[in-house]
Image: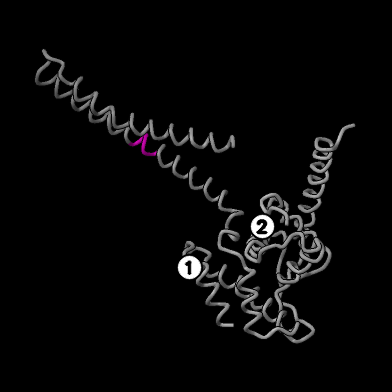
Amino acid sequence: MINSDIIRGHLESVILKLIIEKDMYGYEISNLITERTKNRFNIKEATLYSVVGRLQKKELIESYIGEKSHGGKRRYYKITALGRAYYNQKLSEWIELKKVLDALLEDRK
Amino acid sequence: MKKIVNFVKHTFKDIPKQGKEEIIQSVSESLIEKVEDLVEKGLSEQEAIDKAVLEFGTIEDYFVNFKKQEKKKKRKKTINHYKNDLLFSAVGSVIIISIIVFINLYYLPSTLWFVIPSIGILFWPLSILYNLLNKKENRKDEQDE
């Protein structure tokens, strides 16, 4: 289980990425995160909702009420143009960071 | 579903009023979605509610992300506040000291007693300056961290 302090700064990018793939509702996001990390990282609902709320406030995503196949209503989140741009910027930042850390922590023989 | 709403209300009962309703509403909405999903998967409603509540985490998980920003804002506000205080105290003490000087020179020009109370009065802006510098120093320390 990964220490959530380390991943915290990147949660925004993670959630944006998932929403870019397709419109999603809250629980779907947390399910997908668990699934994709093969249970190595579980996002707490509390954290998820606070990040989503913040993204919405920054107008990086918007929400709408959608129908679900079984008739229930869901609040779906959708990426905005601004959110896409923000994500691309964050992604290149992350790639840069990864390179730097690889260079520093890699075994030298 | 009332249980969920009550749980969320209870969790967020101590947060500032501004935005409280909004947070409670959106969080309970999302949690109810989760419960409905779990029920669809075959859990009983009670089990689903328990699971949702258990996995929700704590209010710290919700606020840890932007508490820092809020703290920063608050500190900036205090510093501005102290700056105003400093200005006020400086102007105030100048006025009081000039009155004392006037009284001194007008009634008893031979002894310059005004110096003594002036020193006392000068401690007013000095103490506030001290506070202000302290606060600024603290902020610098935290930025370095």
* Looking at the image, residue B109 lies above or below residue B82: above
Queried whether the magenta region covers residue A102, the answer comes back as: no
Residue A89, x across and y down, in percent: 79, 48
Q: Amino acid at mark 1?
A: Lys
Give the spatial CA distance, label 1 vs label 2: 25 Å
Q: Seen in the image, is B37 located left or right of residue B7?
A: right
Residue at horizontal 64%, vertical 59%?
A: A54
In front here: B10 or A23? Answer: B10
Does the CB distance between marks 1 and 2 fall below 8 Å?
Answer: no
Q: Amino acid at mark 2?
A: Lys
Q: Residues within 10 Å of mark 2 (few under 14, many from 20)?
A: few
In front here: A67 or B57? Answer: B57
Residue placed under numbered mark 2 in the picture? A58
Res A61 quadrant in image: bottom right
Chain part drawn in magenta: B84-88
Q: Residue furthest front?
A: A109
In front here: B6 or B91? Answer: B6
Label 2 residue SS: loop
Q: Residue furthest top?
A: B110
